[in-house]
Amino acid sequence: MYWLRERIHITWHFTAAMLGFVAGVALALVWWMGPWLGYAMGALLVVFAMWRRRRMLIVLAFVGGTLIGLARGSVAVADLASYKSLYGKMVLLSGVVADDTDAATRGMRMKLGDIMVNGKQLPGQVFATVSGADTARRSDTVSVEGQLRPGFGSFAATITGKSKGVQRPVPGDIPLEVRDNFAGQVRESIAEPAASLGIGYLLGQKSALPADLVEALKITGLTHVVVASGYNLTILVRLGRRLLAKVSKYLSMLSGASLIVLFIAITGLSPSMTRAGLVAGLGLWAWYYGRKFHPVTLLGVAAAVTVAINPSYVWGDLGWLLSFGAFAGVMILAPVATAYLYGKEKVPFVGQLLIETVAAQIATLPIMIMAFQQFSIIAPLANLLILPVIPFIMLLTAIAGFVTWLVPALAGSVGWIPEQLLRLQIAIIDWCANIPWALEKPEWPWWGVVVYSAIVVGAIAYMKYKSKYKLY
């Protein structure tokens, strides 16, 4: 009993409250709570738990966080209810394009925020398929007339219709202009489809990739390398930090923080980039002050902050779910498995990469099966063959773009090496994707996900106990 009454560090109660907040927001879909009651009761429980700091009060902190999350989620659910009366009706809707657009058979597909319907401001995002809006880009305001339907995932509604106008802000989305101009320089020096793959690696832009290559990336479990994600950001931040680490720790931290802000501005605030930017920023801050985050704390804080900003993330945004699933796999499962398999021995690079890839696959497997009824068996091999060379290719692609911008006459020569490496990677991706057993398409009931998750958690607990590994 003394173990339960023992005083522990306050971060554990804080972490429990953060995880409880996310659970509460998810619960709001089926259980409503008065906002002020939830905020008041939840805050009281969390403050008391953090004041007393007893181990047994972690449960109280979690319950308090859940009540606060339930209140926040209830407000968001009530806001989104304003769409229900409009479902099935023809409306005039306008919104700001939140991300890159994609071409479809019936028009351009886009995510719209800052929604106005028939002149009335509404919350949330709408997924739109708009004909006659081929010139629309991120940050443009698009007006569309069509029938409003119920949404899916994190979208409050969907609409398919004709464009009634595209308005571009002045001076426009400057980071987007910089990205597209630089991408144009890369294409001057590297031929397609290698150029689009290199731009995907460097800038997280996949909209220009050929459809067959996109499908091959899905089959091989490599989509994460051509979308703006933590992988791209981590490479850039590490490079920026190491370049100045021996000059000044302050300048090193400043360069890393600047790269985070710049990369997010260029790629946009997608759910995965919001998570990646927040995690990278917290990690950089901890490094500068000589501190360390427990992975569970980092996971809880990042999840709670992103869900507080947009509660619909936890209600079915696949980008958000996959991002946090992979993050949990790499930050929690992978190091525990590494300690269990290798102990205090030095881990070979190939072994570490394979463990991290498999850990991410294990963590995201139930999400992939429930959402797409498929998972990639070839992903560990494909990642092992592709990932080690990507930082080098990113550097060469960036050099090719900058040199082409400064000295256009050198475009062909400076882009030859990255083009050959990218073509080789495309060949490897196609080879992996064409293996007959590369992709499986199982179907799981809901209880199968519960059993699978319990087995994974149990395996982590067992390996952690046997290896005596500490996750800090």
Image: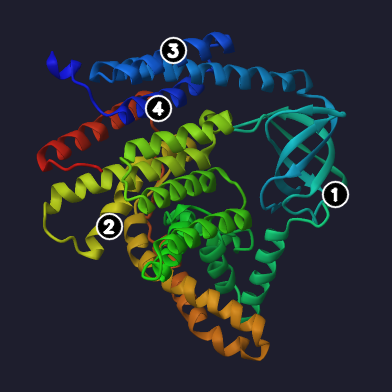
Q: Earlier along the polypeptide chain: callout 3 or callout 4? A: 4
Q: Secondary structure at mark 1?
A: strand
Disc 3 residue crowd, few under 14, some 14–19, many 20+, Cα 10 Å: few
Q: Report the Cα–Cα distance between label 4 and label 2.
A: 29 Å
Q: Earlier along the polypeptide chain: callout 4 or callout 2? A: 4
Q: Earlier along the polypeptide chain: callout 3 or callout 1? A: 3
**Residue sitting at the far right:** 164
Q: Which residue is mark 2?
A: 354
Q: Earlier along the polypeptide chain: callout 4 or callout 1? A: 4
Q: Report the Cα–Cα distance between label 3 and label 4.
A: 17 Å
In the picture, the disc for residue 19 is 4
Q: Which residue is mark 1?
A: 166
Which circle, 3 or 2, is nearer the viewer? 3
Circle 4/circle 1 CB separation < 8 Å: no
Q: Nearer the viewer, residue 470 or 73?
A: 470
Circle 4/circle 2 CB separation < 8 Å: no
